[in-house]
Image (cartoon, rainbow, N blue to C red):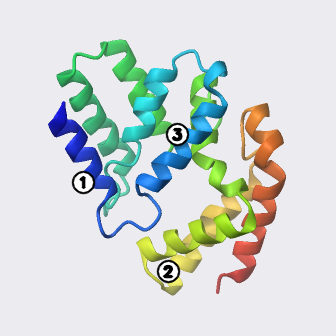
Amino acid sequence: MESCWNEIIASYSDQRRSYHTLIHLQHFSDQLNLCKDQLSDYPTAYLAMIYHDIVYFTMDGTNEEKSAIVAAGHLNRLHYPADLISLCSEMILATKTHAGNSSSDINYFIDADMSILGADEGSYAKYAAGIRKEYGDSIYFDRGRKQILQHFLNMERIFKTDLFFDKYEQQARINIRREIDNLS
């Protein structure tokens, strides 16, 4: 168990990370606590939160898949139930697209992950700067970032659950538009 925890700490403490750090996990945890009573399986959602970005810097865009594999490996070693390992993996994989899901637990999970988009202006600016630092400052970053942000704006609802929609949707749209306007 200690070796699993040490791997988690080392991954989120990687010096290349500026946003996807232990501080991000703390924010995500706080957001999961907001919807704890709505989750049918809070412990599995919490584990998925811990593992969702354990693998982050991949060149092939499979960090979610690789994070789910690490989570499954650790949870198997800890004798976590197989059906819940599967749910944990499904939650992690849902962070790839942040699309609505038939599972309310997954919708709450991805909304908690995305909640930074609806943060106050200063917190959002810090988040955006951290993402830029992780990916590097280039014309390619700006182009790709604009596409991702525009994808979110094109969604009917960024947040899938009423709880997060009511709390963050309006500010998220303001933050995203502002960031798009500030990109090259």
Q: Residues within 10 Å of mark 1 (few under 14, many from 20)?
A: few
Q: Quadrant of residue 13?
A: bottom left
| Nearest to the observer: residue 46 or residue 178 | 46
What residue is shown with label 2? 140
Residue 96 visible (yes or no): no
Which tag, 1 or 2, sits closer to the chain's start? 1
- Identify residue type, mark 1: Ala
Which tag, 2 or 3, sits closer to the chain's start? 3
Q: Quadrant of residue 111?
A: top right
Which element carries disc 1, helix, strand or loop? Answer: helix
Disc 1 and disc 3: Cα gap in Å? 18 Å
Which percent across, then down, holds residue 180? 71, 74
Which numbered dot is residue 10?
A: 1
- Identify residue type, mark 3: Ser
Which element carries disc 3, helix, strand or loop? Answer: helix
Which percent across, then down, holds residue 7? 21, 46
Q: Quadrant of residue 175?
A: bottom right
Which element carries disc 2, helix, strand or loop? Answer: helix
Q: Are marks 1 and 2 in contact (CB under 8 Å)?
A: no
| Nearest to the observer: residue 171 or residue 27 | 27
